[in-house]
Image: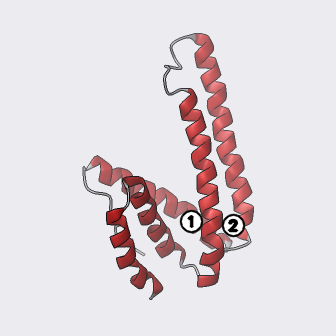
Amino acid sequence: IILFLLLPCAAVMAQEQPKGERIRTIKIGFISERLHLSPEQAAKFWPVYNRCQDELKEVRRDFKQKYKASNPGSDAQMAREFVMDNIEYKQAELNLQKKYKDELLKIISAQQLATLYQAERDFKTMLLKQLKEGKPVKAQPTSR
């Protein structure tokens, strides 16, 4: 019931937000629908999840920024440095996932966490498909 009441609000908010925020709003609805969080869980879950996403975004941004203006394959030394930095970047992402896994398991069940990981992959697939097809980004009903 809560989800059906919030969907129209999310749709209105999505129209007024910049593209990145609109996608984030749609992702929240997508994940909410999949996880079936209780109100108590939702109140604890979203701040932790958003903090994790913000930290992951910062790690990605830092890595991309370092190689934004250069071609890492242009010489052997730069390519070697890129390979090592790429491994460190992936390790930093993994470390954050491990850190937040423990925090999230204090809030949601292991089944819900597994569902979260699958929902994130499904959302990314859906988003890429819509962008590839040139469609406006919107939430699609899930088959459950």
Q: Residue furthest front?
A: 16
Q: Mark 2 points at which residue?
A: 104
Q: Is residue 144 above or below residue 19?
A: below
Q: Is mark 2 on a helix, strand or loop?
A: helix
Other-residue count near label 2 (Cα within 10 Å), few / some / many at <14 / 14–19 / ≥20: many
Quadrant location, the N terminus: bottom left
Left or right: 140 as drawn, with respect to 119: left
Between 69 and 32, the residue placed more toward the observer is 69
Left or right: 9 as drawn, with respect to 60: left
Q: Name the residue under label 1.
A: 116
Q: Is residue 10 above or below residue 16?
A: below
Quadrant location, the C terminus: bottom left
The residue at 62%/42% (across/down) is: 59
The residue at 31%/50% (across/down) is: 131
Q: Is residue 63 above or below residue 101?
A: above
Q: Do the residues labelled 1 and 2 touch (CB within 8 Å)?
A: yes
The residue at 41%/84% (across/down) is: 5
Between 134 and 144, the residue placed more toward the observer is 134
* Number of numbered discs on residues: 2
Q: Is mark 1 on a helix, strand or loop?
A: helix
Where residue 47 sits: x, y (%)?
A: 63, 67
Where residue 136 sits: x, y (%)?
A: 27, 57
Between 33 and 62, the residue placed more toward the observer is 62
Other-residue count near label 1 (Cα within 10 Å), few / some / many at <14 / 14–19 / ≥20: some
Kind of residue indicated by mark 1: Leu
Where residue 99 sits: x, y (%)?
A: 74, 55
Give the mark nearer the N terminus: 1 vs 2. 2
Kind of residue indicated by mark 2: Leu
The residue at 60%/76% (across/down) is: 42
Q: Which residue lies furthest to the bottom in this view?
A: 1
